[in-house]
């Protein structure tokens, strides 16, 4: 399985993404998710993008249509200790099993019938809110900037640190995936390793609960 993108919930209307720009990343497009109550800033790479996400409209996020998918709980990460991370897997044949019993969500910003498959991980909220988009394969990014001042290019690994891990069906499906790992830790944290760490550098972003190695 391959990662399409990862989101990180924040509570400052995305201002913390300025730290990524200062670090040398080139910012891509952004959007408001109409009807969903969230907005984002994005950073694109050769095989992945990083999404900084925040609540744009709490009424939309907690509406009768949107609330059941559990995204609002991730936005409340500072109050409920849920993981603030979301993991989007590329929609491919090898993801059919993991999304077999997924929650279906029809966004207002997609055509009718184009549903997002969601694994809420309600039994282990230390794990990321996991989903796949209705589009098959890796999304094309011709109009997004892929070059960065710090020469970061390709995501090699994403390592999620979780405060508590108990083996379940979700983890069983992902246990042999080289790009995605879960480790037990004293914190919620995301480690992104780019280009096999060939520059032997790393940067911590405390507000994002993020370390980038490159």
Image (tube, helix red, strand yellow):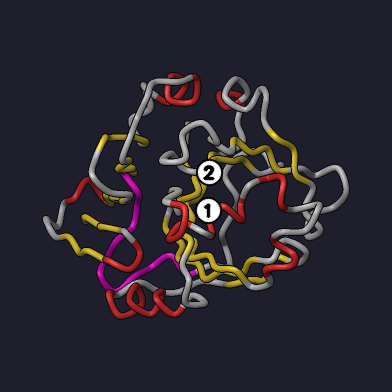
Q: Is residue 13 above or below residue 54?
A: below
Q: Name the residue rendered at 27%, 66% in the picture.
A: 205
- Say if mark 1 contacts mark 2, CB within 8 Å: yes
Q: Is residue 112 above or below residue 26?
A: above
Q: Name the residue rendered at 34%, 70% in the picture.
A: 148
Q: Where residue 166 sits in the image (x, y, percent)? A: 37, 24
Nearest to the observer: residue 195 or residue 190:
190
Q: Main secondary structure of the magenta part?
A: loop
**Is 113 situated left or right of 55 in this image?**
right
- Name which quarter of the figure residue 199 lies in: bottom left
**Magenta segment boundaries in residue numbering:** 145-156
- How many marks the image carries: the answer is 2
Which label is found at residue 185? none
Q: Where residue 62 sits in the image (x, y, percent)? A: 71, 59
**Is 140 situated left or right of 188 in this image?**
right
Q: Residue furthest right?
A: 112
Q: Please check the rendered image and state whether residue 159 is part of the magenta-colored stretch, yes or no.
A: no
Q: Residue furthest left?
A: 200
- Is residue 171 at all visible to an observer of this figure? yes
Q: Name the residue rendered at 72%, 61% in the picture.
A: 36
Nearest to the observer: residue 185 or residue 130:
185
- Is residue 159 at all visible to an observer of this figure? no
**Is 60 situated left or right of 188 in this image?**
right
Residue tagged 1: 74
Residue tagged 2: 129
Q: Name the quarter where the C terminus is drawn.
A: bottom left
Nearest to the observer: residue 175 or residue 152:
175
Counting residues from the start of the chain, the first of labels 1 and 2 encountered is 1
* C-alpha gap between disc 1 and disc 2: 8 Å
Q: Please check the rendered image and state whether residue 153 is part of the magenta-colored stretch, yes or no.
A: yes
Element carrying mark 1: helix
Element carrying mark 2: strand
């Amino acid at each position: 399985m391959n990662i399409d993108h990862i989101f990180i919930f924040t509570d400052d209307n995305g201002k913390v993404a300025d730290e990524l720009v200062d670090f040398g990343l080139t910012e891509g497009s952004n959007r408001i998710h109409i009807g969903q109550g969230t907005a984002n800033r994005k950073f694109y790479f050769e095989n992945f993008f990083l999404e900084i996400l925040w609540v744009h409209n709490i009424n939309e996020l907690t509406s009768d249509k949107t609330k059941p998918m559990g995204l609002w709980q991730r936005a409340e990460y500072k109050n409920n200790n849920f993981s603030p991370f979301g993991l989007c897997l590329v929609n491919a044949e090898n993801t059919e099993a993991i999304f077999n019993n997924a929650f279906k969500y029809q966004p207002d910003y997609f055509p009718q019938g184009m549903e997002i498959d969601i694994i809420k991980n309600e039994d282990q909220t230390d794990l990321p809110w996991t989903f796949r988009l209705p589009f098959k394969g890796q999304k094309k990014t011709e109009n997004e900037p892929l070059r960065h001042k710090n020469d970061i290019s390709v995501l090699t690994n994403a390592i999620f640190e979780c405060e508590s891990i108990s083996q379940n069906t979700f983890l069983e499906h992902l246990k042999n995936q080289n790009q995605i790992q879960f480790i037990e830790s004293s914190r919620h944290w995301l480690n992104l390793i780019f280009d096999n760490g060939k520059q032997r550098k790393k940067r911590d972003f405390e507000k994002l609960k993020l370390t980038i190695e490159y």
